[in-house]
Image: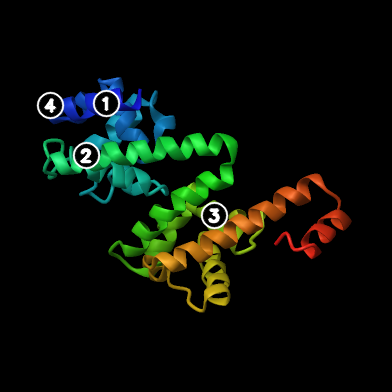
Amino acid sequence: MNERETSYFLENIGNVRSAEDLVSDRRLLQVALGAFGLEGDLNNRFFIQKILSDGTQADDALANRLADSRYREFANAFGLGPGDVPKTSSVSAMEKIANDNLNARFEISVGEADESMRIALFTQHALQELAAQDGSENRKWFDLMGLPPLRSMMETALGLPRAFAQLDLDKQLVVFKDRLQRATGSSDLVQFTDNEAVKKLTDTYLARSQIAQIQSVTSPAQTALILLGGGF
């Protein structure tokens, strides 16, 4: 099925010239959204058409007003907004989207058995891409906070409680930076352009996730015995 959908996407995406063209073809749209982890919006055609048709050139474009930076990346990837050059005829760009969709589907399959592993797999590429993007460190942090999987990973890896998300965004930024500084020696996300830095953070996330799972089904005394036994 994945091979059929990939072939269909690559054979037909070059005919797309407008946002309406893309959202009117459900098979194309499914691959396009899946590449950015936005498959849940498959039935929100009007919303997605607005994202694409607005583009990202204007400050008030819908994608620029949303906290989740995936919508901005999605709009940029196709270039169907005002002042943009359509990218649907670029073979290399569309092949990357098709491959990203396959990777995302694999992550979803893994997540059906273990959600924390799905987030860890997503982090392997998404965090490195975010760390390497242009813009200030604060902008990168706000983009991370707007990406649910990366945010969840970072909160868990740094030992932050669920209620943390209720704080003012500027306060969250200060706390995130402070916790990362204490954990890694630097508060800058640019450190995660390095594969080893991403791996260390992901390992910490997985370890903390497993501890949380153990604590959810065992008593504090049992948890202590497991940890003392060398499980972590």
Amino acid under label 4? Asn
Are there few (<14), some (14-19), or many (20+) residues within 10 Å of tag 3? many
In the picture as drawn, the residue positioned furthest to the right comes out as 221
Q: Where is residue 109 in the image (x, y as percent from the top left)?
A: 49, 34
Instruction: Indicate the amino acid at tag 3.
Output: Met
In terms of sequence position, does the residue under pointer 1 or pointer 3 come before the other?
A: 1
Type of residue at label 1?
Answer: Leu
Residue 89 location (% of width, % of height): 11, 36
Q: What residue is pinned by disc 3?
A: 153
Q: Which of 18 and 226 is in front in this view?
A: 226
Q: Which residue is drawn at 79% across and 44% down?
A: 217
Q: Where is residue 190 drawn, in percent x and y?
A: 38, 69
Up the image or down, 69 lies above or below 15; here it is below
Q: Is residue 32 above or below residue 134?
A: above
Crowd rating for badge 1 (residues with CA inside 10 Å; few <14, some 14–19, many 20+)? many
Q: CB atoms at circles 4 and 1 under 8 Å apart?
A: no
Q: Which of marks 1 and 2 is in front?
A: 2
Mark earlier in primary sequence (1, 2): 1
Q: In which quarter of the image is residue 35?
A: top left
- The residue indicated by pointer 1 is 28
User: Which structural element holds mark 2?
Assistant: helix
| Disc on res. 15 | 4
